[in-house]
Amino acid sequence: MFNKFYLSHMQAKHKKYAGPVGISIILGLLSFMPRLLIVTFLSKTPEPPLEWWQTSVIYQVYPRSFQDSNGDGVGDLQGIRSRLDHLEYINARALWLSPMYESPMRDFGYDPSNITNIDPIFGTMEDFDELLADVHSRGMKMILDFIPNHTSDLHKWFQASKAGVEEYKDYYVWTDGNLTANGTRVPPNNWKSFFGDSAWEWVEERQQFYLHQFLKEQPDLNYRNPKVVEEMTNALRFWLERGVDGFRIDAVLTMFESADLSLNEPLNNRPGAELWQYESLEHIYTSHQPETYEVIAKWRHLADEYYQKDGNYRFLVTEAYCETIQQAMYYYHTGADMPFNFDLVFLNRTCGGDCVDRAISNWMTNMPIGKWPNWVIGNHDNKRIATKMGTEFVNAMNTLLLLLPGTPTTYNGEELGLTNIEVSYEDTQDPFGKRFGPERYHEVSRDPPRSPMLWDSTHSSGFSNATKTWLPVHPDYEIFNAEAQRKAEGVTPLKMYRDLSLLRQEATFQRGTFKPLLVDENIYSFVRELEGESLYYVILNFGSTEAQVDLAEQGLPENGLVKLNSGDFHHSDYNVGKEIKLNKISLNPGQFLVIKYDV
């Protein structure tokens, strides 16, 4: 387990490998201080068993796009249930279910009007219970998206608060605002929502402004009111009682804001940021407030109550896009098992080996002692990796995701190597995208990575038998669908993903040490090692030109066995199972090798 390791900065990445002698990597000398690569020799002691969230691949399912069971063109819970074999095929043992709560769908479920009920578009609570039972019967776990920052403006709490009902009056953040010389009411400060413009909305009925850090239809809850904390804690308890195994806690960075609503946030002078945009301000009063960490710690205590009852660990992961690595790291101290790591999400085709190294070392060298790393390469809010990096780099990116130390999270469809789809303005569903009109919607729309899952070559790729699906099906569904990829003779992204996820089950990748090896403008490579187990070298070309590599010069053995390759070599030199010389390896852009050496 990583709490026995100490991680280092990748200072030795250009130096010779010290050899297979039980090297351990130290994951942190101090929680928030830069660290140097330190190679140490530790006596072998029995390691405690890893928890399920450390050994599993977490697979994110976006319910609207996974599988439609009733022919309305929208995915649902019974549809997900019918496709659990796919998760088993790719060896994903944890299902993260994006919101399926009752909602007016102004932000597709991230605006819940009842966070303890299922929206009819996805099914019923009985459907949910059946899905959960099926997941558990397969030895898998279920993680729910939990949305604590806000509710829908149609939530009964907000409707009562807006009407001034005493019990709910302070469930949200309300203010009189400021009065101008001509008698006009204006917001109390310059705070902006993530979607631009003021974070304050005037309500005539109440004669006050309310805060919304997201859409105006998503009013922020007031966590300075103990009743709100109690309500949301009870919501978590509701789902824990039903048997869920963990929560991805959405948008935790904005749960609290300064109690002093008169404070303006300073401009950050970011190049390219327009004054109306969220990015134009330093969010020192509206994000990462210390009270947030106290609430998450309370929820950790709740999760641990259930762990103590039945021995099944309840997992908590926080979601926060942070300005600094220090902000991200602090969530490790809140009781969350980990904050999601988005450093790989933002890679694109300009990123070569050095760039990949910076993204990885940024997390690993700053992670506090005893904590566990994690990796994400895509989700429902960001471009697909094949679109950002190019289809030839899909297998290389999934290799990083699955063979680096820690827990990987995969967004549905990334294992197929899907690209974004083109969505016309007429077919656009994302409310945020629609607000920018037909001229600019494509700049901000989140629809392109949310297209329906591709299952086979039938109508709508097996996703639905409806005449029209909620978003268009990918035009290349006959090529990229899961069935075609499984049956193909050669290597496909899906079969490669499966091979990688199975390889990840080996002890060396579960708890072995990690050390970057050769890194340059093209190449990123690393070593995974565990005493008494096979040692592995992973070498990838993220550059734009062919790279010649001499691994023997790095202190590695002269020969090694090819365990996996990227499948796109036009020769047999690097066939799987072949012993190769390590002094002259040639890789084209996007190609990789996983080389095994038995100590």
Image (cartoon, rainbow, N blue to C red):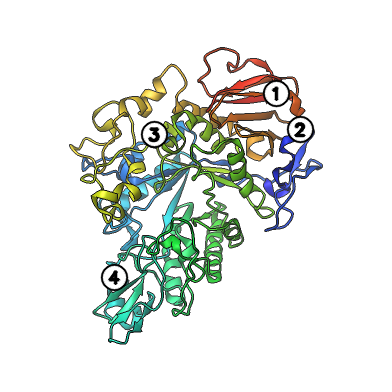
Q: CA distance from mark 3 to mark 4?
A: 40 Å
Dot 2: what SS?
Answer: loop
Q: Give the percent coordinates (x, y) of residue 270.
A: 49, 59
Which residue is most to the left?
467
Residue identifier under label 3: 418
Label 4: few (<14), some (14–19) or many (≥20) C-alpha neighbours in 10 Å: some
In this view, the mark in front (1 or 2): 1
Residue identifier under label 4: 156
Point out the image quarter for the C terminus: top right
Q: Relative to residue 113, is residue 33 drawn left or right?
A: right
Dot 3: what SS?
Answer: loop
The answer to whether mark 1 and mark 3 are in CB contact below 8 A is no
The answer to whether mark 3 and mark 4 are in CB contact below 8 A is no
In the rendered image, which quarter is residue 510 located in? top right
Which badge, 3 or 2, comes first in the chain's sequence?
A: 2
Instruction: Indicate whether 363 appears above or below 153.
Output: above
Residue at 38 percent of width and 29 percent of height: 482
Which residue is most to the top?
572
Residue at 53 percent of width and 43 percent of height: 344
Question: Type of residue at label 2?
Answer: Tyr
Residue identifier under label 1: 550
Instruction: Indicate whether 217 appears above or below 588.
Output: below
Residue identifier under label 2: 17
In this view, the mark in front (1 or 3): 1
Point out the image quarter for the N terminus: top right
